[in-house]
Image (cartoon, rainbow, N blue to C red):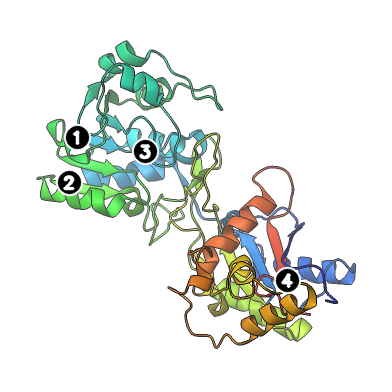
């Protein structure tokens, strides 16, 4: 076995990206500089990834509180709005909420409990059980919530999100009433105009509300879907996937990325002669076992990728082969037998075969996006580009 390394994920440093920058040229140049420095040797089926943040920054895809307020007012009438199932995040939702509040007279804020959609907890399960609260049935007022659970602060941020969101709404000149429920239809006892802020369950939520008699039901994916007074926009995801940029603006999820990844792929082929796959990634799709937070607050892990990244892994479980098919072999004989088994794969799906049992049943882009998110981090590493080698190799690769 001449080659000892399998998959390698490398963060590539890049300059700070500004609106109007030629991102295809910058990303390609950064990788080419790493090649010149001897840090990367480009191979066919390497994967070149860039975070969605630098794509949106280069696009200038931003919206202000006033832009959001104007869109909310135009689409939801500007009176009382039920704002339901937001995630608990200063980065992800607070600025959006300011815009929503500025676009109406009153918000009935309905929070899911004991946690939001991505695992940020408002209350502890044990305390909830102690008070006999049934999260599947009970609708709590803010007074009841305080009587049962007090003034709970998030363990990582130190923020009482009930108080924080209420104050944000009042600061924008709107009245606020807070309730707690997990059935979206509970909001219809307060208002028939609803903005649902959940991410991955939004289609079911809209369906239930519409069937129950809501007059106007929109999701965050339907706010900022076109320019408002020259703003940025996302025609597919609206405000979903947005992040705080300043106290008055959000950076929207990038749009129209497909041409970008294909351009970079073509540039890499022209400069290296190698076929490199390219993708844009956002949040990874994994859950923290301690904080219980599911990382995926973006609507998708990857908004754009080249064709070679489509699909799911089609792999054999080596330990299954070693313990079953070739239990009587060891050493080189075992290695050769496993290599022969892998080489015999003909490209047809291995789903349902025992030898594939336990392999990760997820999309390739979700797996690679999670690897990228963990590699680049969200702080000061300065590596918004991730270069991955050996991802499509197997035990037979030399």
The answer to which of marks 1 and 3 sits earlier in the sequence is 3
Point out the image quarter for the C terminus.
bottom right
Compared with residue 395, is residue 64 higher up or lower down, i.e. above or below? Answer: above
For this view, does 76 lie left or right of residue 365?
left
Q: Residue under label 1, please give it.
A: 187
* 156 or 354, nearer to the observer: 354
Instruction: State the CA–CA distance, disc 4 to disc 2.
Output: 47 Å
Q: Kindly state the secondary structure of the residue where label 3 is placed.
A: loop
Q: Total of numbered circles in the picture?
A: 4
Identity of the residue drawn at 39% across and 41% down = 117
Q: Earlier in the sequence, mark 3 or mark 2?
A: 3
Give me the residue at 85% from left, 77% from top.
2
Give the number of the disc on residue 28.
Answer: 4
Q: Nearer the viewer, mark 4 or mark 3?
A: 3
Q: Is residue 214 above or below residue 188?
A: below
Secondary structure category for the residue under label 4? helix
Rendering quarter of residue 280: bottom right
Residue where numbered disc 2 is placed: 209
Residue 283, position in %: x, y? 54, 52
Which corner quadrant holds the N terminus? bottom right
Counting residues from the start of the chain, the first of labels 4 and 2 encountered is: 4
Disc 2, SS? helix
Residue 187, given in percent of the width and then of the height, sits at 19, 35
Which label was assigned to residue 258? none
Question: In this figure, which residue is indicated by the disc labeled 3?
Answer: 86
């Amino acid at each position: 076995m001449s080659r000892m390394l399998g998959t390698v994920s490398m963060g590539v440093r890049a300059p700070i990206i500004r609106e109007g920058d030629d991102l295809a040229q910058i990303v390609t140049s950064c990788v080419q500089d790493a090649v010149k420095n001897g840090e990367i040797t480009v191979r066919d089926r390497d994967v070149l990834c860039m975070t969605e943040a630098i794509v949106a920054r280069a696009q200038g895809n931003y919206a202000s509180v006033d832009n959001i307020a104007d869109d909310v007012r135009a689409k939801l009438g500007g009176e009382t709005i039920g704002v339901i199932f937001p995630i608990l995040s200063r980065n992800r939702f607070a600025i959006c909420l300011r815009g929503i509040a500025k676009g109406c007279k009153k918000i009935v804020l309905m929070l899911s409990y004991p946690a939001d959609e991505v695992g940020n907890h408002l209350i502890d399960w044990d305390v909830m059980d102690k008070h006999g609260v049934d999260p599947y049935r009970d609708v709590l007022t803010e007074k009841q919530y305080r009587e049962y659970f007090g003034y709970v602060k998030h363990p990582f941020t130190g923020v009482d999100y009930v108080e924080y969101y209420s104050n944000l709404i009042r600061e924008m000149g709107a009245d606020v009433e807070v309730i707690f429920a997990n059935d979206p239809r509970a909001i219809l006892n307060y208002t028939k105009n609803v903005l649902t802020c959940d991410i991955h369950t939004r289609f079911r939520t809209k369906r239930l509300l519409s069937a129950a008699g809501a007059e106007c039901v929109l999701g965050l994916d339907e706010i900022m879907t076109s320019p408002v007074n020259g703003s940025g926009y996302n025609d597919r995801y609206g405000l979903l996937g947005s992040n705080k940029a300043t106290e008055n603006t959000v950076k929207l999820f990038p749009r129209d990325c497909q041409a970008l990844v294909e351009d970079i792929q073509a540039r890499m082929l022209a400069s290296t002669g190698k076929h490199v796959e390219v993708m844009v990634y956002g949040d990874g799709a994994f859950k923290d076992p301690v904080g219980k937070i599911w990382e995926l607050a973006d609507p998708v892990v990857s908004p754009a990728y080249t064709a070679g990244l489509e699909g799911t892994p089609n792999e054999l479980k080596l330990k299954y082969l070693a313990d079953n098919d070739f239990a009587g072999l060891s050493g080189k004989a075992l290695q050769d037998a496993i290599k022969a088994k892998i080489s015999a794969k003909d490209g047809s799906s291995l789903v349902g075969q025992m030898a594939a049992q336990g392999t990760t049943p997820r999309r390739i882009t979700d797996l690679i996006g999670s690897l990228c998110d963990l590699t680049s981090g969200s702080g000061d590493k300065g590596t918004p580009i991730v270069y991955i080698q050996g991802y499509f190799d197997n035990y037979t690769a030399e």
